[in-house]
Amino acid sequence: MAGAQLGRTLRAAALIGGMPIIVLLGLAVLGELSPGAAVLGLLLCAAAAGGLAWVWIGDLARLADALRRAAAEDGQLGPVADQSFLPAVAEVGEGVSRLARTLAERGALVGRLRRADEAIVENLPDPLLVLSPERAPLRANAAARALFGAGEDGDGLRGGDVAALLRHPTLAEAVDRALAGGRPQTADLVLPVPIARELAAQVIRMEPPLADGGRIVIVLSDRTRERAVERMRHDFVANASHELRTPLASLIGFIETLRGPAEDDAVARKRFLAIMAEQSERMRRLIDDLLGLSRIELTEHQPPTGSAAVGTIARAEAEALEPLLKARRVTVDLALDEAATAAPADGEQVAQVVRNLLENAVRHGREGGRVGLAVAAETRGGRPGVALSVADDGPGIPKAEIPRLTERFYRVDKGRSRSAGGTGLGLAIVKHIVNRHRGQLGIESEEGMGATFKVWLPAQPGEMPRIAARNQPAATAE
């Protein structure tokens, strides 16, 4: 480095002092200067040229070094702080400083605008995905990550259901059209797994590409809730009109009887009023279950948040059913892992699952029989989770009927189900809650051997602390 600077200094000195030296040599040759004066003049010119070249080259070197340091700071050119000795170099340095300040201000403005754009995209209510020219997902806003359960790392998106979306043939065709024609394209999609979702996608080609290389922007609109509301209205009217017809006809008939032939019959009036109260309660339960099922279906496509201590919830629900247990003379055998915790999970909905399965087992099991309620940690497919099991000793279910048990109002024995007080919606509610939790529902039964309902809910790693004695003797609640 020092050798290079010395060479530049010598060349600059030769350039500066060359002309005066040539003049002095010419005067000496012509005899206008004595040899001593000529030699002294040559030495003075060489010294002056060398000193001036040293200062000039040093100032330029310091200026260049300041520019290199400023450019290396976060890739932005900052102001030059060094002050040069020569006026010309100082003027250049000042000009560079002004240019650096202007560029720094513009860079800061661009940075603020970029951060503002990123904040706007991140907080958009509609899901948004950015794809590379190779159609690899680069980033997604908060709404998209929540919709697909995905996270982000240094190489783009990871996990979730984004891959299933990008493999959808309808969306792939829309991306092809957008890349080929340059015009925005739209597509209506239905993603069947893990929960059926209906999406409207708008595919936009970015020209020029975004700063991160993104070439395709996909804006999604989740229509699942809207379509669910439409179906809910239709199903509610259809189901309510069908299921309410019988109890309503009974109420009308009893009212007409009490107004007419049984008007003065105290015994008949008492018996009829009891039946009317029973039918009214049945209609109330039916409407409550229909409304509850409709609310669950509206949020089925949205994963829950939080966690649920399934073992603790199961114990509380078993204690809450004590009046029904005594009425049916049923004993519940508990085998509960109090540390079993599902996450993400909605505690209220998990309680609803336990309550519906337990009521189903008590009402349809053998009177005076036993019901088993068990909760334990269980890993499936490498995923940690919680297994809930409810078993009864009732008449069992024919294998041909098992696939239809979770349908609305489907009953294996319609007369027995109504007499037991069921609405035919309990297992449908369980199925939709389990679907929302991305869990699994299994039913095992043989005629004459009772039935077992098993629910598996996912849990986060480390969410359930291990306990030393997991297999403890079963407690009994009556």
Image (cartoon, rainbow, N blue to C red):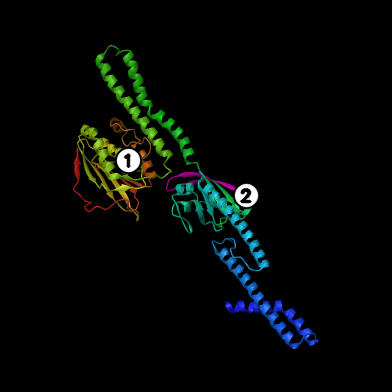
Q: Which residues are magenta?
A: 183-200
Name the main secondary structure of what is drawn in magenta: strand
**Which quarter of the rendered picture does the C terminus lie within?**
top left
Q: Is residue 444 visible?
A: no
Say the numbered circle drawn on residue 229. Answer: none
Residue ID for mark 2 = 183
In the picture shown, does residue 56 fall above or below 276? below
Relative to residue 35, is residue 253 drawn left or right? left
Q: Does the image show residue 87?
A: yes
How far apart are labels 1 and 2 at the CA level?
Answer: 48 Å
Residue 263 drawn at (x, y percent): 30, 12
Q: Residue at x 31, y 40 (%)?
A: 351
Please state the horizontal and vertical placement of residue 106, each as a whole percent of the image: 61, 55
* Res 353 label: 1
Amino acid type indicated by mark 2: Arg
Quadrant assignment, res 283: top left
Pointer 1 or 2: first along the chain:
2
Q: Residue 2: x, y in percent?
A: 58, 77
Residue at image x 46%, y 47%? 147
- Left or right of 163 on screen, residue 373: left
